[in-house]
Image (spheres, grey):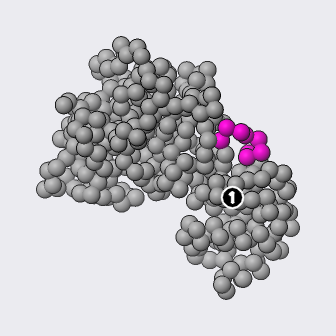
């Protein structure tokens, strides 16, 4: 209570410039704020304190708290402005609301597509001859997707993308949904990938094939940081794959053909400010196609007449739609929204 009162004494003088009152009524449970928080300095401070408590945020000094409040205030201004402008999706005050956009990008991305760019893998695209596609697919409903995970501030998204695709094909082939180890890839797959400093999914598939499989997550748990490779683990219960293929680049129809049969590893540009605060709906940008984040495509469908791809992220279940984002399809651009059609791949597993 003392800290809260002290912070108010510090905040009041620096809050002379208030936000423009929002004419839109927001559902507080969805976006995390309401118009009254933008019209009252006391309510805004109260909102910040409530947000701190909800997300367990503790700062080392009052100066740091003041700085984070200013960032929070600027982010809320952006969120409210964009919610007035967009209609197919909405933004909200998630756990990243005290991070500047530059801080967010430096901590939560990690795909090294330009440094590690790889040629198409050998062999034909498995699903080239598929003609009929179901109207919708959701691998979560088919039991082929593990709960959403959280990479934390380790840039290991490439490992989470790889693992999600393998968990999916393993379930499809064996009937067993097994949560697998991202940490093993981060610690051990170091020939081309760089742990928390980024990597690429195709190289991870190659590592798993060459090294006899992937351990269960419970046997090799996630640390949110680079660790030491435990190459000589006695645990032998691993999940293997027999190969992998790349989906033809910039070909949405081919991506859907593959996605109708299994979850995929895909790459996107996730560095846009709207993506940082995405909370729901069908996301349709703005974003470019400079790939910087590895995720998993786990289905597709239609909402209010618009087609979307279901994407599993690795920023925990508090982000987006319980850890997922629906991304608009049929944008008229071959690369797809945020470049999602540029670098898709999938593992194969023999029965």
Residue appearing at x 72%, y 64% in the figure: 70
Left or right, residue 73 beside residue 51:
right
Q: Nearer the viewer, residue 151 or 25?
A: 25
Q: In the rendered image, is residue 65 in sight?
A: yes
Left or right, residue 247 beside residue 219:
right
Residue appearing at x 54%, y 24% in the figure: 335
User: What is the span of residues highlighted in magenta in the rendered image?
Assistant: 82-89
Percent x, y of residue 178: 28, 48
Percent x, y of residue 108: 51, 51
Percent x, y of residue 305: 63, 28
Quarter of the picture holding the C terminus: top left
Residue appearing at x 40%, y 58% in the figure: 224
| Local crowd size for mark 1, using a 10 Å CA cut-off: few (<14), some (14–19), many (≥20) | few
Percent x, y of residue 144: 34, 41
Q: In the image, is residue 74 above or below residue 115?
A: below
Left or right, residue 217 beside residue 46:
left
Left or right, residue 83 beside residue 200:
right
Is residue 85 found inside the magenta-colored segment of the image? Answer: yes
- From this viewpoint, which residue is outermost toward the bottom? 2
Q: In the image, is residue 63 above or below residue 349?
A: below
């Amino acid at each position: 209570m003392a800290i809260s009162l002290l912070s108010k004494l510090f905040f009041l003088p620096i809050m002379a410039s208030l936000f423009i009152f929002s004419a839109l009524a927001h559902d507080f449970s969805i976006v995390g704020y309401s118009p009254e928080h933008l019209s009252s300095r006391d309510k805004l401070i109260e909102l910040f304190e409530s947000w701190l408590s909800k997300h367990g945020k503790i700062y080392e000094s009052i100066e740091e708290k003041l700085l984070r409040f200013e960032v929070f205030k600027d982010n809320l201004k952006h969120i409210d402005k964009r919610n007035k402008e967009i209609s197919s999706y909405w933004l909200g005050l998630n756990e990243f609301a005290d991070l500047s956009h530059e801080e967010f990008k430096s901590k939560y991305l990690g795909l090294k597509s330009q440094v590690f760019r790889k040629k198409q893998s050998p062999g034909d695209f498995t699903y080239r001859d598929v003609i009929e596609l179901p109207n919708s697919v959701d691998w979560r409903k088919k039991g082929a997707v593990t709960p959403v995970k959280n990479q934390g501030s380790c840039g290991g998204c490439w490992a989470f993308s790889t693992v999600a695709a393998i968990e999916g094909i393993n379930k499809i082939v064996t009937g067993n949904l097994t949560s697998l180890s991202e940490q093993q890839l981060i610690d051990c797959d170091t020939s081309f990938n760089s742990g928390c400093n980024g990597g690429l999914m195709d190289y991870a598939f190659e590592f798993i094939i060459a090294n006899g499989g992937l351990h269960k997550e419970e046997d090799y748990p996630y640390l949110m940081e680079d660790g030491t490779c435990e190459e000589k683990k006695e645990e032998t219960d691993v999940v293997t794959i027999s190969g992998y293929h790349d989906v033809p680049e910039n070909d949405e129809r081919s991506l859907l053909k593959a996605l109708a049969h299994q979850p995929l590893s895909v790459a996107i540009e996730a560095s846009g400010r709207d993506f940082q605060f995405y909370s729901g709906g069908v996301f349709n940008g703005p974003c470019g196609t400079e790939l910087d984040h590895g995720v998993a495509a786990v289905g597709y469908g239609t909402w209010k007449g618009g087609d979307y791809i279901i994407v599993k992220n690795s920023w925990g279940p508090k982000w987006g739609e319980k850890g997922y984002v629906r991304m608009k399809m049929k944008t008229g651009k071959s690369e797809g929204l945020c470049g999602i059609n540029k670098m898709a791949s999938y593992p194969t597993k023999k029965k």
